[in-house]
Amino acid sequence: MAALPDGRPITRWTFGTPGGVTAEVLSLGARLEALHAPDRDGRRANVVLGGADVAELLDAAAYFGATVGRYANRVAGGRLPLDGTVHRLATQHTGHTLHGGPDGYATRSWDGEPVQEEQRVGVRLRLHSPDGDQGFPGALTAEVTYLLDADGELTIDYRAVTDAPTVVNLTNHAYFNLAGEGNGTVLDHLLRVDASGYLPVDEELIPLGPVEPVAGTPFDLREARALGERFALRHPQLLPAGSGYDHTWVLDGTGLRTAAVLTDPASGRRLECRTTEPGLQVYTGNLFDGSVTGRSGRPYRAYAGIALETQHFPDSPNRPDYPSTVLRPGEEYRSTTVYRFTVEN
């Protein structure tokens, strides 16, 4: 995996603690390509899904581990109203804008440099997105920093500035399988999400509007539940995503706090996700069909991984009642997400 089709090199940074948690980040899409973590017996495995070659990372696996933007998730109809003007964004075949459009940040080449702190190591990557990029107004400079400490805590910090009013919603789109990439499904994983509400969606996965309580639904994960057990419950909201989750949970609390905890009982690996964001999009790979082959050499089929995407809400530009994603000149967009890996005996 040395270069893009046009000859531009792809840089890989590898950092972490030998025998502990180590990460691999690519300049292509500012992408978390691999994350190796030990199980309860000390055996290390890559717990992040990824494409086996560049062609997949530019196509079917474009979002795997990538920093997605300028607007993560969906903007209905590619319609962006801002300050009295409606901007028309580039759309995918669905007619909606997903993860910044068909040529979003996931397939861009980011500039990067290694970062060394007293207790953490990692990489900082930057991307300049010009005015009109995929239809978004304003030139945006985005920055994402990955920092990993010896205790297995991976911090992802996002920053962005603009020269004209725009919207920004960045996230990381890693898919996790704590049993190891390519090693079966996540249906036996236990998931807890600290949220009392979620956003129901229509058949095209656009939020219907108001926040609904999770109580009495398969979306009640305030106590850890096996994903397969939740999906066995018959509920109409599990159908639009293909018999699983592709929904936003409205997180309780504010500031940097726990959003979710994912556990694989078999290996003992445990992932705690903390974030400053108001929402968590959970997608359980329901529609994976084997078209992507991982580094393990095994194809990814339904439920091969779970994405825990910390972000603002889908379609916020068209929903004045949702938290704003507007960024103006002189302001700085800032967001932090922390993934902490531990082991349960």
Image (cartoon, rainbow, N blue to C red):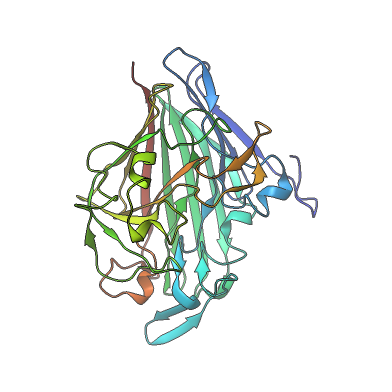
- Image x and y of residue 62, in percent: 61, 52
Quadrant where the C terminus is found in the figure: top left
> 233 or 182, which lies in front?
233
Answer whether residue 281 is visible to the viewer in this image.
yes
> 275 or 91, which lies in front?
91
Residue 59: image quadrant is: bottom right
Q: How many marks?
A: 0
Residue 112 left/right relative to 117: right
Question: Who's the residue at 47% across and 56% down the image?
Answer: 242
Residue that protrudes farthest toward the bottom in the picture: 84
> 88 or 11, which lies in front?
88
Question: Who's the residue at 37% across and 46% down the image?
Answer: 231
- Image x and y of residue 29, in percent: 59, 50
Answer whether residue 312 is visible to the viewer in this image.
no
Question: Who's the residue at 36% across and 51% down the image?
Answer: 335
Residue 228 left/right relative to 49: left
